[in-house]
Amino acid sequence: MSDRLGVSVTPTSLTVGAGDTAQATATIRNAGTSVDQFTIAVDGLDASWYALPVSSVALFPNDKDELKITLHPPKEGIKGGTYPFRIKVTSQENAADFATVNMVLQVGTLPEVGVDIAPLSVTGRRGHYHVMITNPGASDAVLNLRASSADRRVRLAVGPPGALPVPPGGRIDASVDAGLGWLTLFFGKREVPFQVTATAAGSTEGKTAAAKLVAITWYQWLGQIRWPWLSRPPVINTFRATTDDNRQFRLAWAVKRAAEVKLDDEAIAKTGDRTVRPTEARTYVLTASNRYGTATQKVEVRPVTMPKAVTSDRIKVSLSSTQLQANAGGMPVPVAVKVENMGQIVDKFLVEVQGIDESWYTRSASSIALMPQASSQVQVALQPPKRKPVREGTYPFAITVRSQAQPQDATTILAQLRIPPLIEYKATVRPFRVTGRGKGSFTVTLANTGVSDVALSLDATDLDDGLTFRFKKETPVIPAWSSLDVTMVAKQKRGMPLGDKKRFDITVNAREPEGKCQTAACELHVAPVSSWKIVWRIVRALIVLGIIFVVVFFVLKWGGGLGQLVKSPKTWVNQFTQTVEGWFNR
């Protein structure tokens, strides 16, 4: 033992199962007056039973350090019991200086039989359970398997029947079937626990595993029946990503027969779209599920990647501004790129713009030649065009100046170009003229020709205030550089079945939230069921037919009636003649 060093271990007695792990903390203190290196060793245990984080530590005078000693006796090939050992710390400067701590390791062997059951719970009238029996011992085991429950309404069947031989270090699989009678469907939902016990032959004690069968009600049981025409998994009809500029992506999807739809981990509707602006390559996962299955589909997007800022000792670059703003289709915004040759040779430098389309900028020069320690400027004019797919927002870009003599030497400066909002849209109605009986259908086309999404409010009026209007979408949102068709139905308030055709002049208004408005005109011609001319023609025809009917009626009556005419036409003619002659002989 030595007074120059001190060792303590916590705890000094450990209990661990075979194959498990335990830890002890050793504290080493240098009580000497010089810097020393100390070696740590474990005496009394096999080297495979423990692990040291380091074999030695260096300590200053009055300094200390803590080490975690991990003990892990092997799972197989050992006996349970007590294993004494010691921790020894020795000075490398003087081997005679050492310190020890006595310790005890209590190892417990694994149980001779292990029983596991899965699943632990089944809902329904019947359940099938898988039983796994393991024998970690070194000798054969012959086991009997039985299942029991305090609830006598559950029927339990164990298979295979009889004694089950389990080899040393091996396992065997068995099964348990649990069932309840039909009457349990009418007693409500309840849990029926049971136990599975594996015992050695001639022994009453053994290992037990528990599980349960959850009884359900009759209406829940009906819901579990799978009808062939309904038991179908969900289907993802479409899931795609589209982009115009490789910066902003539109995800669109359509799913059918799904109870739940998720985009990554977010719950979403069965049909819809979403706009995303990822900063790096990313994969989006659409998952649709119902009680009969799950469908998954992936879409990968790869946005424009920006180079990182780089500085070269030979090239010094500065920008007149790194935060710029330019209107789409507006005046160009200049930015001066100052380049200084900090090297010792004459060199030519290439000026490159990265991250934005070439049509967005112009350069006064693509390269400049500079003497050592000289500087010059290149003017870059930024002018984003007013066309698809340019949208409002912030567009990062980079300006790189590269040496032509040594292309690996380059300086990159990062900047941002902001395009402010610009709302421009047009509203048109087609067809211009609709003829109908009391109502007409029109299509209002809203075309967004600006760089910003626009939310509009639709309404319509007519000069006579004789119509009511209904839009399929009264507050549509039109993305930039897109168009949307909205159905409008105009209906007459007070319709007349008779009368002349009437024309209604309609004005459709598409209003911005700020109050600005675009208008479009159309006409509705309401045609009545019939005009008065046709009515009078029908009345005249009815009067003529009535007169003819009266004349025929009296003529037949004067001859003796229709029956007389059919029975004896000659008699009818004689009687008619006599009737007429009698009028003149009076």
Image (tube, helix red, strand yellow):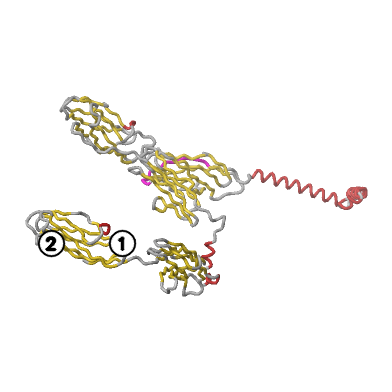
Residue that carries the numbered disc 2 in the rendered image:
6
Residue 543 visible to an observer of this rendering? yes
Q: Quadrant of residue 70?
A: bottom left
At a point 38% along the width and 67% down the height, the residue shown is: 112
In the displayed structure, would residue 584 be above or below residue 17?
above
* Image position, residue 146 (x, y; %): 47, 70
Q: Count numbered badges in the picture.
A: 2
Q: Amino acid at mark 1?
A: Asp
Where disc 1 sits, the SS reads: loop
Labelled disc at residue 337: none
Viewer-nearest residue: 444 or 574? 444
Residue that carries the numbered disc 1 in the rendered image:
20
At a point 53% along the width and 44% down the height, the residue shown is: 441
Viewer-nearest residue: 30 or 165? 165
Q: Is 519 included in the stretch rendered in magenta? A: yes
Q: Quadrant of residue 77?
A: bottom left
* Image position, residue 321 (x, y; %): 23, 36
Range of magenta residues: 513-523
Q: Residues within 10 Å of mark 1 (few under 14, many from 20)?
A: some
- Left/right placement of residue 534 relative to residue 307 reads right
Q: Amino acid at mark 2?
A: Gly
Q: Is 313 included in the stretch rendered in magenta? A: no
State which quarter of the image contains the N terminus: bottom left
Residue 11 visible to an observer of this rendering? no
- Left/right placement of residue 577 relative to residue 330 reads right
Viewer-nearest residue: 210 or 320? 210
Disc with the residue nearer the chain's start (2 vs 1): 2
Q: Residues within 10 Å of mark 2 (few under 14, many from 20)?
A: some
Where disc 2 sits, the SS reads: strand
